[in-house]
Image (cartoon, rainbow, N blue to C red):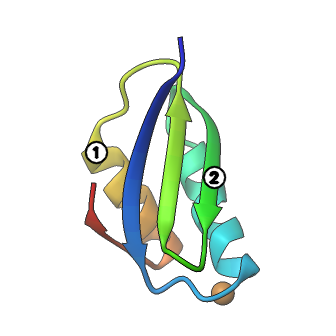
Amino acid sequence: MSISTDYQVTGMTCGHCAASVTEEVSKIPGVTDVQVDVATGRVTVLADEPVPADAVTAAVDEAGYEVVSA
Ligand SMILES: [Cu+2]
């Protein structure tokens, strides 16, 4: 079963930003796919187990951006 959760992220401006966020969020256990829409700042996290929002927030922060809402 795949769980899909959307997050709103600020600061992303290009494909490199999207790649950085994808790389960091993909490291979270259980995450199977990450889809980033730079234009809207929407990050969709697909996982096969519940992923704590704190973990996603921390990973996005690690990439250099900020989650503004989940
Ligand atoms: Cu960029």
Q: Position of residue 9 (x, y in %)?
A: 40, 71
Q: Is residue 10 left or right of residue 26?
A: left
> For the point 28% across and 45% down, which residue is it?
53
Beta carbon at label 2 within 8 Å of ligand 1? no
Secondary structure, mark 1, is helix
Q: Position of residue 3 (x, y in %)?
A: 46, 25
Q: Quadrant of ligand 1?
A: bottom right
Q: Earlier in the sequence, mark 1 or mark 2?
A: 2
* Mark 1 vs mark 2, CA separation in Å: 16 Å
Q: Position of residue 35 (x, y in %)?
A: 63, 52
Residue at the far top in the pictured view: 1
> For the point 66% across and 56% down, which residue is it?
23
> Does the CB distance between marks 1 and 2 fall below 8 Å?
no
Residue 7: which disc? none
Which mark lies nearer to you, 1 or 2?
2
| Number of numbered discs visible in the structure rendering | 2
- Is residue 20 or residue 36 the one in the foreground? 36
Secondary structure, mark 2, is strand
Q: Which residue is mark 2?
A: 35
From the viewer's perspective, is residue 16 above or below residue 52?
A: below
Q: Amino acid at mark 1?
A: Ala
Pointer 2: residues within 10 angstroms few (<14), some, or many (20+)?
A: some
Q: Quadrant of the C terminus?
A: bottom left
From the viewer's perspective, is residue 14 above or below residue 53?
A: below
Pointer 1: residues within 10 angstroms few (<14), some, or many (20+)?
A: some
Q: Amino acid at mark 2?
A: Gln
Q: Position of residue 6 (x, y in %)?
A: 41, 49
> For the point 48% across and 73% down, which residue is it?
41
> For the point 47% across and 34% down, which residue is it?
4
Residue 53: which disc? 1
